[in-house]
Image: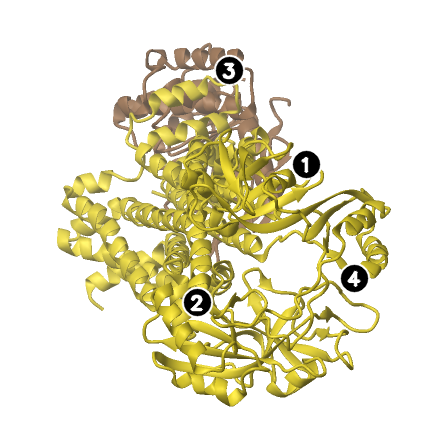
């Protein structure tokens, strides 16, 4: 081995603590960068990527099985413009209950179930997330939704009591279709058992078109399909553009937060690597002097120290890549849930770019101080680096000595002033950590509050639908679908119960604390193009109104509450009036508030029932929201209410707030990213304190020889960074608050809404006080290990150390 | 404690490092209060090991070390730290002053570690600096002082808590002749005032000037033990106990 190689090897092996810290630091930095970078990359058009991977369906066509045969539907694959097709798959809609025997969950929403033997294919290659695909009858695969599995999990049973023989199916898998072509899939042979006697199942056909960029493109495709089958057979279609729009909007909501964390993580990584590597090289200045005295040239010294830094950094980088990819799996899975797309993976090029970038940074960080030291005159290099330059921090030392604190503490407090540059790097590392913690706290709190606010569009603990349950399969309705050209009037549309009777039954039910009815209606507002979705509130809705951005909730006739997009579209402000147009009549209604709403792309309007009545629209609630009296058992209440509602032909079901897997996913991401940031910050502190205590080991030995006890030594070392940590924490909190104040409204902008002040003002005095201590905690945690090492080091050995 | 009580009582001490030969091999030694014991010997004879054991900086492999009535060999790290700051003063060859503290702050350090009263400690430091002739340097930093002056500061620091035992490890080893003579005179004065001193040195002149008793170590054993005060100047002093 060459002399230079021996110097490098000895340098790495001799400073084991330093080497381990460098390995850990680069590992954490690379891990954080890959996770952060992976998230940032994944946030770029995730729907488009997932849609391309799954060969998503540009158009999903639903055909009435009573009007077209399977062969006729299959023939549509050859329609002009269609480049790929899958199907036909028989489709039914059925209402399940979860579980069997005595323990069952009722009131679940109906499922659109497709009979599909294979999950792959030329169109809509569904991604399996859990379990396996159906292999025969008696099995069902549920679609993962934006909020995770719809209900139930693999191994549980879904039964269909309304169907003959009450068929039961075992959930064998959870799968995700980016095109959202079905709620569940079964074997084709199962469809017959799920179809009501005498009814024919509908058919679903999935298409990809040569031209599918716009609604007009897809409109032409739809017309061609409708023409290829008997009139009225195409009962509905779903365009991928609607799904894409929703997904993109959801994605856009989360991008600011992901990017903020990602950038924080990357900046932290750069900073910490710079601190660790340059610190390690600076600490070796005296050794550089020795090497020079032995005849090494400045170039050789530079190469030796770059090599010395690169060896542990390379090990850390490799470990970081592995760890980053492993740690990204759950994180990206959560992100994919949030984005409503199939599972994401770390972009391959990140696994190359991040290590290359980090190693380049290590070289740059090592080279500058190594060359600086190498250019010093040998005697200077020998003299520098062992102890702080005399003269620095004397004023602080004198001032600290006057404080009425123990001497160990005052010595520690004065310590940072002796090495201001090093103290500044600790400050920066801790401040970034504190920014991350503060931002994470605010983000988590705001997201939770926003989710609560958005859940207010489904208020109450119990909901009563005033329409009879879905009429079952074979009716060709294609629930929720846009009617295709020539489609027949939807037969068998469920009948609405006597809403007044429902309201009376609900009000009379013991345990009801409050209830109000809501009805959705498409109406026009003067000056607003197209129809606007209006939700009419009938009854006292003061306990279940939307979360307000400004103004107040509905409390009188002819009032409306709107979202930001509506205000922007109309150019109106809270307090202004707009003209509502109904069945040939119009009336002025007053905007009394702006609410948090993203429904109907932010155009959704909440109106007092009187506003609709004023334009001649009869308000017959689609559903009633019910708030239960405290202490009421919801299960018992539901059983009793459903008995009372049975004669009316309607059903009540539990309304669970959508504490959604999205928020849980976001919280998990926030927690993981925060832990990473804090760990990297802590490592930065640890490294710097290790350097400091190593360099001051002789002084520490002197103090211990004079009688400084281990606890006092720990106190002194910890205090030397605690002050910096406290100050950094104090600086980090406002920066974190500012970042939160920028990111949350940006997320709101992306979603097309203002954020209510109550969701933004989450930094209350007690949390802020605790957050301000975060810098102190990070600093102390990072310093504790080297402090204990310093306390345990033999005094005799310390005194002998040069 | 009476003036004739043993300040140091070492019994059958053996100290080995790893698999090497014994640094101290069955050594027994007592030092009475008021004695100034010089420990002589070639490099590797066990002088520094003996000093470390007495100061509680290290533990013997076998045997017992009692200093001022305290079994030092069984103390915890905290216990030995407390023992040092209350009963021991140490003077080193290379002074071991903290360069970023002023002379006064260096001297005050032991009393501050004990938690002594501020005013009382400052008065004691001023008294020591005055007596040792370095009061004019009270606000200076050690880097500006001569070797002899630094060693005087180190002595002042060592005496700050009125220790039962002053340990001096080659106190003149890094000094020029004139400064060495100053330190010799100072240690002699201290001993004359009753300060018990354990002095590890190669400097025969120092041993002759200060020591009331001299032992010589070779390979961890005492090969010579000579009693008798060979010189020194007595004088009124405020520095001793």
Task: Give the alpha-carbon distance from disc 2 to disc 1, as whole Å.
Answer: 38 Å
Q: Residue A378: x, y in percent?
A: 16, 43
Parent chain of label 4: A
User: Which callout, 4 or 2, points to the residue nearer the camera?
Assistant: 4
Cα–Cα span, label 3 and label 4: 92 Å
Q: CA distance from mark 4 to mark 2?
A: 36 Å
Q: Residue at x 36, y 12 (%)?
A: B135
Q: Earlier in the sequence, mark 4 or mark 2?
A: 2
Q: Tell me the residue that label 2 is attached to.
A: A240
Task: Pick whichever of labels 2 and 1 is earlier in the sequence.
Answer: 2
Q: Nearer the viewer, residue B9 or A52?
A: A52
Residue A197 lies, in percent from the top left, at 72, 83
Mark 3 packing: few (<14 Cα in 10 Å), some, or many (20+)? many
- Quickly name the residue at label 4: A649
| SS at mark 2 in the image | helix
Residue A542 bears which disc, if any? 1
Q: Position of residue A200 (x, y in %)?
A: 63, 82
Labelled pair 4, 2 in contact (Cβ < 8 Å): no
Chain B representation colour: brown
The answer to which quarter of the image holds residue A662 is bottom right
Query: Disc 1 vs disc 3: Cβ atoms closer than 8 Å?
Result: no
- Image quarter where the N terminus of chain A lies is bottom left
Which residue occupies 84% across, 58% down?
A: A639
Q: Which chain is yellow?
A: A
Q: Mark 1–mark 4 contact, CB under 8 Å?
A: no
Q: Secondary structure at mark 3?
A: helix
Chain to which the residue tagged by mark 1 belongs: A
**Label of residue B137 in the image:** none
């Amino acid at each position: 081995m060459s002399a230079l190689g021996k110097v490098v090897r000895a340098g790495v092996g001799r400073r084991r603590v330093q080497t381990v810290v460098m390995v850990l630091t680069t590992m954490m930095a690379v891990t954080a960068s890959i996770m952060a970078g992976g998230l940032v990359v994944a946030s770029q058009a995730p729907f488009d990527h997932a849609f391309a991977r799954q060969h998503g369906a540009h158009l999903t066509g639903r055909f009435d099985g009573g009007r077209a045969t399977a062969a006729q539907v299959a023939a549509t694959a050859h329609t002009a413009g269609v480049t790929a097709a899958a199907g036909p798959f028989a489709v039914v809609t059925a209402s399940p209950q979860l579980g069997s025997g005595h323990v069952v969950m009722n009131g679940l929403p109906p499922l659109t179930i497709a009979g599909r033997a294979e999950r792959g294919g030329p169109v809509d290659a569904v991604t399996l997330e859990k379990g396996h695909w159906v292999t025969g009858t008696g099995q069902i695969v549920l679609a993962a939704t934006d909020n995770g599995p719809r209900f139930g999990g693999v191994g549980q049973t879904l039964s269909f009591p309304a169907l003959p023989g009450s068929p039961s199916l075992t959930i064998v898998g959870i799968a995700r279709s980016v095109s959202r072509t079905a709620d569940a899939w079964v074997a084709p042979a199962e469809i017959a058992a799920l179809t009501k006697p005498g009814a024919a199942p509908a058919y679903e056909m999935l298409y990809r078109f040569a031209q599918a960029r716009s609604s007009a493109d897809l409109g032409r495709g739809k017309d061609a399909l409708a023409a290829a089958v008997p009139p009225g057979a195409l009962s509905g279609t779903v365009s991928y553009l609607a799904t894409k729009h929703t997904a993109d909007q959801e994605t856009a909501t989360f991008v600011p937060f992901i990017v903020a964390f990602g950038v924080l993580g990357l900046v932290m990584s750069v900073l910490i690597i710079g601190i660790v590597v340059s610190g390690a090289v600076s600490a070796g200045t005296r050794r550089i002097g020795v090497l020079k005295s032995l005849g090494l040239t400045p170039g050789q010294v530079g190469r030796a120290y770059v090599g010395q830094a690169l060896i542990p950094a390379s090990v850390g980088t490799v470990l970081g890549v592995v760890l980053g990819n492993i740690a990204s799996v759950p994180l990206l899975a959560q992100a994919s849930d949030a984005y409503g797309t199939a599972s994401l993976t770390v972009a391959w090029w990140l696994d190359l770019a991040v290590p290359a970038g980090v190693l380049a940074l290590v070289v740059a960080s090592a080279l500058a101080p190594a060359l600086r030291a190498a250019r010093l005159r040998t005697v200077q290099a020998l003299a520098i680096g062992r102890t702080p330059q005399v003269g620095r921090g004397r004023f602080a030392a004198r001032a600290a000595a006057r404080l009425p604190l123990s001497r160990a503490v005052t010595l520690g407090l004065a310590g940072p002033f002796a090495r201001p540059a090093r103290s500044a790097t600790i400050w920066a590392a801790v401040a970034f950590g504190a920014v991350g913690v503060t931002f994470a706290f605010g983000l988590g709190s705001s997201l939770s509050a926003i989710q609560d606010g958005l859940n207010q569009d489904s208020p109450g603990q119990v909901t009563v639908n005033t329409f009879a349950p879905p009429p079952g399969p074979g009716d060709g309705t294609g629930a929720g679908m846009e009617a295709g050209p020539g489609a027949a009037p939807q037969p068998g549309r469920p009948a609405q119960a006597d809403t007044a009777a429902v309201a009376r039954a609900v009000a009379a039910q013991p345990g009801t604390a409050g209830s109000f009815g809501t009805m959705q209606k498409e109406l026009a507002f003067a000056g607003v193009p197209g129809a606007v979705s209006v939700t009419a509130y009938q009854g006292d809705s003061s306990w279940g109104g939307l979360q307000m951005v400004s103004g107040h909730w509905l409390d009188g006739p002819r009032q409306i509450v709107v979202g930001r997009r509506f205000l922007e579209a109309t150019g109106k402000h809270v307090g202004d009036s707009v003209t509502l147009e109904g069945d040939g009549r119009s009336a002025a209604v007053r905007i009394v508030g702006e609410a948090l709403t993203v429904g109907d792309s932010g155009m959704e309007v909440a109106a007092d029932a009187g506003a609709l009545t004023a334009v001649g629209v009869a308000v017959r609630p689609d559903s009633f929201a019910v708030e239960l009296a405290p202490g009421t058992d919801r299960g018992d209440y539901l059983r009793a209410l459903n008995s009372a509602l049975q004669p009316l032909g309607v059903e009540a079901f539990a309304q669970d707030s959508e504490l959604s897997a999205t928020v849980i996913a976001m919280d998990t991401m926030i927690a993981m990213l925060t832990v990473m940031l804090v760990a990297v910050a802590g490592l930065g502190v640890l490294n710097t304190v290790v350097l400091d205590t190593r360099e001051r080991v002789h002084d520490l030995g002197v103090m211990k020889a004079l009688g400084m006890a281990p606890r006092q030594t720990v106190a002194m070392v910890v205090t030397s960074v605690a002050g910096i940590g406290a100050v950094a924490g104090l600086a980090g909190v406002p920066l974190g608050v500012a970042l939160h104040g920028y990111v949350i409204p940006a997320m709101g902008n992306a979603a097309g809404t203002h954020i209510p002040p109550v969701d933004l003002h989450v930094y209350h005095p007690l949390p802020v006080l605790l957050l301000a201590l975060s810098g102190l905690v990070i600093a102390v945690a990072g310093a504790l290990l080297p402090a204990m090492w310093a306390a345990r080091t033999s005094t005799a050995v310390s005194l002998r150390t040069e | 404690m009476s003036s004739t009580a043993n300040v140091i009582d070492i019994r059958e001490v053996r100290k080995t490092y790893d698999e090497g030969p014994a640094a101290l091999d069955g050594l027994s030694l007592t030092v009475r209060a008021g004695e100034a014991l010089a420990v002589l010997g070639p490099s590797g004879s066990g002088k520094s090991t003996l000093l470390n054991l007495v100061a509680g900086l290290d533990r013997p492999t076998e045997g017992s070390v009692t200093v001022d009535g305290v079994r030092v060999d069984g103390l915890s790290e905290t216990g030995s730290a407390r023992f040092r700051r209350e009963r021991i003063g140490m003077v080193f060859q290379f002074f071991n002053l903290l360069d970023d503290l002023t002379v006064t702050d260096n001297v005050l350090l032991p009393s501050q570690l004990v938690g002594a009263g501020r005013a009382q400690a400052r008065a004691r430091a001023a008294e020591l600096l005055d007596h040792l002739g370095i009061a004019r340097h009270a606000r200076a930093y050690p880097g500006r002082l001569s070797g002899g002056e630094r060693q005087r500061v180190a002595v002042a620091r060592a005496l700050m808590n009125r220790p039962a035992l002053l340990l001096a490890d080659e106190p003149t080893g890094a000094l020029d002749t004139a400064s060495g003579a100053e330190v010799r005179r100072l240690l002699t004065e201290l001993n004359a005032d009753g300060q018990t001193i354990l002095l590890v040195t190669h400097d025969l002149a120092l041993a002759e000037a200060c020591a009331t008793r001299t032992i010589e170590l070779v390979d961890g054993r005492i090969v010579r033990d000579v009693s008798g005060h060979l010189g020194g100047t007595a004088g009124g002093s405020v520095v001793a106990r």
